[in-house]
Image (cartoon, helix red, strand yellow):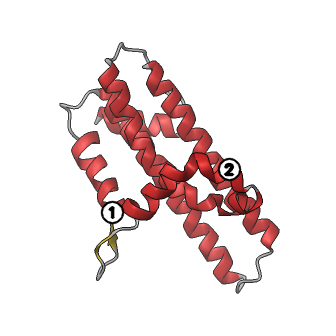
Amino acid sequence: MTWQPTTNLHRFYSCLPYLLPMSAGVIYGAVLFRQFPVLIYPFMPIIWLYSNVMTLPLVPAIGLTGEFVLFLGLYFLVVRDVRVPRFIRFNAMQAILMQITLFIGQLVFQIITQLSSGLLPSLISSTFANTMFIGTMVLSVYAIYYSIKGEYSDIPTLSQAAAFQCEI
């Protein structure tokens, strides 16, 4: 990505969408939080965001939650709006793609758990959960760091897909 100077406000707004994958990925940290209770303290605001905003049932009959509304809002109101600076749209799309990756990982994990009839060894499920948690947090912090610097983060595959979506 080519570097373009951005304002401090653009940098701040480009960091906000990464709260979506961070709050969705914090549930995978339960294994680590049980093993290392002090680790929960830095993640308390994200846990609060997940439990009070993301899981808020807006339309319980169809399972519509706050997470889904934020997801659609980011896509249609930020990524698709050409009036929003490209830097913000790129970071919002990258956060959405991280969220989709988390969702696919969760589906795969649930399918494997169902097929094994709950006999999936705890070592495998703990390793999967820890990998999802650490991977999500590392990628989000990496992207936020580059957003604060005013540069485009380069996450393989996600960045190319986000750039492609922002060009359309």
Residue visible at 30% across and 79% down in the picture: 60
Between 13 and 156, the one nearer to me in the picture: 13
Q: Nearer the viewer, mark 2 or mark 1?
A: 2
Identify whether 68 is placed above or below 141: below
- Circle nearer the N terminus (2, 1): 2
- Label 1 sits on a secondary structure element that is helix
Tell me the distance, in whole angstroms, between the alpha carbons under discs 2 and 1.
Answer: 26 Å
100 vs 10, left or right, is right
Residue visible at 61% across and 49% down in the picture: 41
The residue beneath circle 1 is: 66
Residue visible at 22% across and 45% down in the picture: 77
23 vs 72, left or right, is right
The residue beneath circle 2 is: 39
121 vs 140, left or right, is right
- Label 2 sits on a secondary structure element that is helix
Residue 31 on image: x %, y %: 71, 63
Q: Is residue 122 visible?
A: yes
Dot 2 amino acid type:
Leu
Quadrant containing the C terminus is top left
Residue 36 on image: x %, y %: 75, 55
